[in-house]
Image (cartoon, rainbow, N blue to C red):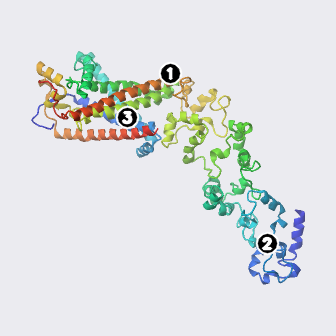
Amino acid sequence: MKLATAVLFVLSLTGAAGAAGIDCLSCHAEKASAKKSVHGALACADCHAAIRAFPHPDKVAPVNCASCHAGNASALAQSVHAGAGGPTCLNCHGDPHSILPAKDSQSTTYPANLPRTCGSCHGNAQLAKQLGLQEVYSLYMDSIHGFALTRDGLLVAASCSSCHGSHDILSSKDPMSKTNHVNVPQTCGTCHAGPLRDYTSSIHGQMLQAAPEEAPVCTNCHTAHQIAKVGTAEWQMKTTATCGGCHKDEYATYRDTFHAQVSALGYQQTARCWDCHGHHDILPPSDPKSTVASGQLVSTCGKCHAGASASFVKYDPHADSHDAVHYPALHYSAVFMNLLLASVLGFFALHTLAWFIRSHSGGNAGTKPKESPPE
Amino acid sequence: MDDANARYYIRFSLAQRYLHWALAGTFLGLAFTGMTLRFSTAPWMQSLARAVGGFGFVLFFHKFCALILTVTFLTHVADLVYRIVGKREWSLLWGPNSMVPRWKDLQDLIGNLKWFVHLGPKPRLDRYAYWDKLDYWGVFWGMAIIGFSGYAMWFGSFFARLMPGSWLNIALLIHGEEAILATGWIFVIHFFNTHLRPENFPMDLTIFTGRLSEEELKKMHPEEYERLVNSGGLQAIAAEAPPRWLNNFGRSIGAAAIFAGVVMLILMAVAFIRE
């Protein structure tokens, strides 16, 4: 780093000069903008090192950014963007003579501009399809991060590089990737330290230690690019299905309850998974600290149900009427009701049908029955 | 039916007709609100819930109808008690004017089944047919099951002081199942037996006008007619022909109620099949 600074200082003395004191701008006047760029202090020949004399050949060797930015270049060479067809330095950093420092609000790599820069490829549905990727730009732009960053100008909001890195972006399949399933909590936790703390001690966080591949991480519930504001009705209405994606049995039994009926109708004023179980800090019922531990139920149910008592919380929000072993009273009530319905409605449906047919076949519909005895 | 020269006889008192309106109105109100919850995953039930003003209104209206229906039911029970205990009308407890089932009901059922398959004559019915009695007792059974479970859920924390909270699981289950039984019964069987069957189509106006013509009484309740003729009781229940407005009122509101019920039945049936 010191060496680079020293080199820059020496070079800066030479101004916009090529090799052997040639004034490049006398021909390339349109490149004068370079003086305002982050590289303004450099001489043309510092980058265009292949040009050693004037006049120079029509075709010269391309500029090698790596001659100064060796670290970034090698990171890029290891990254998911490496190789032919992948983006070069200029795809992201823009016009080589106008490159600005990332903290300049005009820079292509300024946080608020970065989504558009990455989106020039990752917002292209055709390209995304070709590469087997999702078109994530529009998803991100509508997310809580995209909205905060690009519309509110909240620079601490996550931009692409906050989660993916920049030159060193790795495929999420790579165990070293910041976006690899196992690493997601740490990546999100860089900003969201509170949720990370709660998650780490939760049953899901413990599972991440025991069975990392199966444990849910931030993105399983919040998605990666579409992350929504959790306070919105739209997001809250989807949460039960999200939890139910893994907890299938619990989802099925929940759907038999009044809580679920109200929710399915599209109304929020009812208990969904996390109202009872918590969210980042979910603990198993066997843990006395869990909101659904038997000792906590009166207070948990009592959040909505004023007057909830020890007897009241014997109500089982996940009772399964098909399970005769654990819920015999409920199960046999269901069997009884089903038999009652089937027999009563079945018998009288046939009764009705037979009557209807008889009324039309006897030719006496609406008239006095033939068989009617004399008065 | 509108024959002004025909003789008419009273079958239902004005109070009974009011009770039937209250019962029919609240029943439809309960069905239209309750079924949005029972079949809450069906998009049309969601639209219906939104259309009436959202879940808050659905629940409010459901409870409102439940209260009116409870009052209706208790009014009838109080009237019965008054007539039996106070006025000693023992005939309400047994015999042709009683809703209490008797042998003849079973004979009528068997007779009717035989008639369906051309094995016998149409049974000669008395004042109440067996399907009338099933309609009637269905309300008692329904009030016991659906009313009790409904109030248990409404006042869940109070209920849990009297009974284990796990009974609330059973309460919702039987409340929903019984609702399907009740709506299925009313919208298919009651509607057909009483109104839509070819002999009565499109509806039997008796419950709306309170009276039937001599021809209808003879045809639909031959045993009763014969008994009244023999005992000379016919004159006591003679009435004027129902005024045209009453016929029209009964026809239009009655038809609207039947139509609403059939629409709800279809919405439920499709949602049930999808489940």
* Left or right: B99 in relation to A246: left
Q: Residue at x 22, y 19 (%)?
A: B96
Mark 1 and mark 3 lie on one chain; the one further toward the N terminus is: 3
> Marks 3 and 2: in contact by CB < 8 Å?
no
Chain at numbered mark 1:
B
Q: Name the kind of residue labelled 3 in the image.
A: Cys
Furthest toward the left, the residue is: B5
Q: Distance between the residues labelled 1 and 3?
A: 26 Å
Q: How crowded is mark 3: few (under 14 residues within 10 Å), some or many (20 or more)?
A: many
Q: Mark 2 points at which residue?
A: A62
Q: Distance between the residues labelled 2 and 1?
A: 85 Å
Residue B60 versus residue A373 in the image, above or below: below
Q: Mark 1 points at which residue?
A: B163
Q: Which of marks 2 and 3 is in front?
A: 2
Percent coordinates x, y for residue B15 in the rendering: 25, 29
Q: Can residue B148 be seen in this view?
A: no
- How many callouts does the rendering have? 3
* Left or right: A328 in relation to B104: right
* Left or right: B5 in relation to A150: left
Can marks 2 and 3 be said to lie on one chain?
no
Q: Residue at x 62, y 53 (%)?
A: A144
Chain at numbered mark 2:
A
Q: Name the residue under label 3.
A: B65
Q: Name the kind of residue labelled 1 in the image.
A: Met
